[in-house]
Image (cartoon, grey):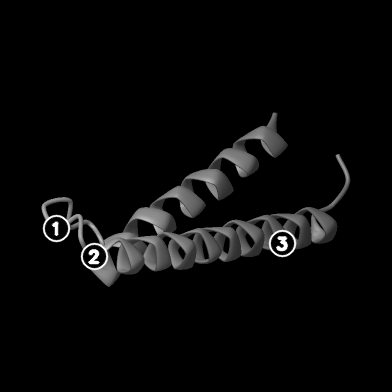
Amino acid sequence: MNQLREHQVALWAGISAFFGSLLAIGAIDVLNPTDLLKLTGSIIVAFVTAGGVYAKQRLDDAKKEEHSPPE
C-alpha cells in the first residue's frame, strides 16, 4: 500500500510540473492559434520536465525504501 502512495505522489509531482512548466513558458495562449510552433515546443518541454520530476521522485522513493529497515 505504501508503494502505491509513493507512486501517486510521484505522479502528482509530474503532473504539477507539467502544468507549471506550461504556465512558466506562457504557452497557454489559446486565443492566439497562429503560434502553434511555440505551443508545440512548450508542450514537449513540459512533458520532458514532468518526466524528469516523476523519475526523480521515484528514484528518491526507491532510495528511501532501500535504506529503510525491513518490516
Q: Where residue 59 appears, x then y in whole percent?
A: 71, 61
Q: Where residue 15 appears, x then y in whole percent?
A: 45, 48
Name the one closer to the observer, 62 or 11: 11
Residue at 82%, 61% in the rendered image: 67
Tell me which amino acid carries mark 3: Leu
- Kindly report which numbered mark, 3 or 2, lies closer to the viewer in this rendering: 2
Residue indicated by mark 3: 59
Residue indicated by mark 1: 32
Residue at 50%, 58% in the rendered image: 47
Q: Is residue 61 left or right of residue 8?
A: right
- Kindly report which numbered mark, 3 or 1, lies closer to the viewer in this rendering: 1
Q: Earlier in the sequence, mark 3 or mark 1?
A: 1
Label 2 CA crowd tier, 10 Å (few <14, some 14–19, many 20+): few
Label 3 CA crowd tier, 10 Å (few <14, some 14–19, many 20+): few
* Total numbered labels: 3
Tell me which amino acid carries mark 1: Asn
Q: How far apart, in angstroms, are the residues tagged by discs 3 and 1? A: 39 Å
Name the one closer to the observer, 23 or 66: 23
Residue indicated by mark 2: 35
Residue sitting at the far front? 34
Q: Where residue 57 appears, x then y in whole percent?
A: 61, 59
Q: Is residue 14 left or right of residue 31?
A: right
Q: Earlier in the sequence, mark 3 or mark 2?
A: 2
Given contact means CB atoms under 8 Å apart, are the residues at marks 1 and 2 in contact?
yes
Q: Is residue 32 left or right of residue 9?
A: left
Residue sitting at the far top? 1
Label 1 CA crowd tier, 10 Å (few <14, some 14–19, many 20+): few
- Label 2 sits on a secondary structure element that is loop
Residue sitting at the far right? 70
Quadrant location, the N terminus:
top right
Q: How far apart, in angstroms, are the residues tagged by discs 1 and 2? A: 6 Å
Q: Is residue 58 left or right of residue 12?
A: right
